[in-house]
Image (tube, helix red, strand yellow):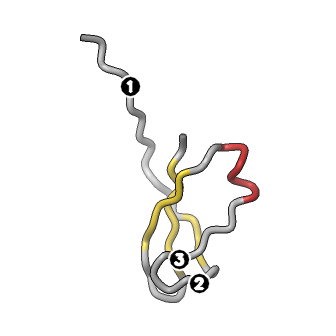
Amino acid sequence: MPVYEFQCKKCSEVFEVKCRVEEYSKLKPTCPKCKSEEVERKISTFYAQTESKT
């Protein structure tokens, strides 16, 4: 499941939201600190986790 990174335009809080790709278009993220809906998506690095074969 992808993790999307956002930054609040009011308080500058950076936070992450986990959701499925098909849910992203309906996503209305709000800042967890000040509850503002004025957020912008940040460009994040790609991260993949694989299972360990031991």
Residue underneath mark 2: 36
Which of the marked residues, 3 or 1, is nearer the chain's N terminus?
Answer: 3
Question: Identity of the amino acid at label 2?
Answer: Ser
- Residue at point 38% right, 25% down? 50
Q: Whole-percent x and y of residue 44?
A: 46, 54
Mark 3: secondary structure: loop
Q: Residues within 10 Å of mark 2 (few under 14, many from 20)?
A: some
Mark 2: secondary structure: loop
Q: Residue furthest right?
A: 26
Question: Identity of the amino acid at label 3?
Answer: Cys
- Residue at point 75% right, 58% down? 26
The span from disc 3 to disc 1 (Cα, nearest Å) is 30 Å
Determine whether label 2 and label 3 are within 8 Å by CB.
yes
Q: Is residue 7 left or right of residue 40?
A: left
Q: Whole-percent x and y of residue 5?
A: 49, 60
Determine whether label 1 and label 2 are within 8 Å by CB.
no
Residue underneath mark 3: 31
Mark 1: secondary structure: loop
Q: Which mark is residue 50?
A: 1
Q: Is residue 5 left or right of residue 49?
A: right
In this rendering, is residue 15 above or below 49? below
- Residue at point 74% right, 55% down? 25
